[in-house]
Image: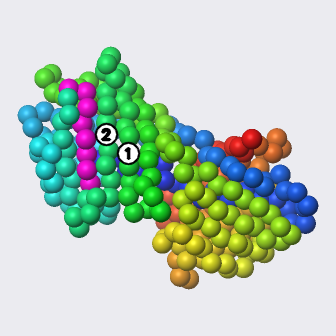
Amino acid sequence: MRTIRALAFFGLVFVAPIGMAQSVFDGTWRPDPQKPSATRAPDVFELANGLYDCQSCKPPYKIKADGLDQPIAGNPNYDTLSVAVIDDRTIMKTAKNSGKTVMEMKAVVSADGNSETEQRTMYGMGPHPIELTSKSSRVSAGPQGSHRLSGGWQLIETDLTNHDEDTTYKISGDTLTMSDRMGRSFVAKLDGTDAPYKGDPKFTSVSVKMIDSRTIEESDKNGSNVTKIARWSVEPDGKTIHVRFDNTQGKIQEQTGHKME
């Protein structure tokens, strides 16, 4: 099962220089669909003879495709997975952790066999389920006689289906207020002092500081540990933002967003 990547662009923060009566960053912002790295390897699956083999998963696994929960070792997000074949172009996956459903995914191959769309629903990550849509193009065929999902697929883009990442920001004096449709929020001074982070169990506090007139850095913390650093810069058009995410463990992701009219 593919690692969920689309979740990296949640919680973008956009602010303006302290003292501006009306910040160009005030309003609601929406990250663009996330594009994969140019060096990202294709996803490779094989579904044949009642077995589903995810060769590109980390770690790889092969389980029965009988619609029943099968044990999965080495995945931090779930410990069982079921794969059900709906028809010759469609499968359903359900992932559980300690018996509780954490993700459901429907994968559909196009009639011509050259593209694939995944509709994914994730549970327990916010006040309501999160839906993701991923699109991929075929780069290699599967073995003869296998399900049409079999083969290599290159991810094109991933986006939140219902745009739960839409986030509203307001600058008042030296204070930034953030809230999003996920139920997350904070009110923080722009001087780097800690403030409570609400609505996300991964973070207990946040600090925000201004680097220069168009660059802001946010540090999200769990206890005393900084677990994510987001740095963003605003384009002169006032409608485009470029964000760099650092998970503090060597993984860097970048994202572009646009201001909603």
Residue 226 spot, x, y in % from top left = 57, 74
Q: Quadrant of the C terminus?
A: top right
Say few, some or many: other residues with alpha carbon within 10 Å of mark 1 (under 14 / 14 to 19 / 20 or more): many
Residue 142 spot, x, y in % from top left = 22, 27
Q: Please tell me how many numbered marks the rendered image carries.
A: 2
| Residue in the foreground of this view, choosing between 226 and 16 | 16
When the figure is inspected, residue 102 is found, relative to residue 241, above or below; the finding is: below
Q: Which amino acid type is marked by label 2?
A: Lys
Residue occupying image coordinates x 68% and y 49%: 29
Residue 128 spot, x, y in % from top left = 45, 58
Provide the major secondary structure of the magenta segment. strand
Q: Quadrant of residue 50?
A: top left
Magenta-highlighted residues:
88-95
Which residue is denoted by mark 2 in the rendering?
A: 106
| Residue in the foreground of this view, choosing between 174 and 232 | 174
Q: Is residue 94 magenta?
A: yes
Q: Which amino acid type is marked by label 1?
A: Arg
Spatial distance from mark 2 to mark 1, Cα to Cα?
6 Å
Residue occupying image coordinates x 26% and y 32%: 90
Which residue is denoted by mark 1 in the rendering?
A: 120
Residue occupying image coordinates x 20% and y 58%: 80
When the figure is inspected, residue 20 is found, relative to residue 106, above or below; the finding is: below
Say few, some or many: other residues with alpha carbon within 10 Å of mark 2 (under 14 / 14 to 19 / 20 or more): some
Horizontal side of residue 21 vs 47, given as left or right: right
Q: Is residue 197 magenta?
A: no
Residue 33 spot, x, y in % from top left = 55, 40
Contact, CB < 8 Å: mark 2 with mark 1?
yes
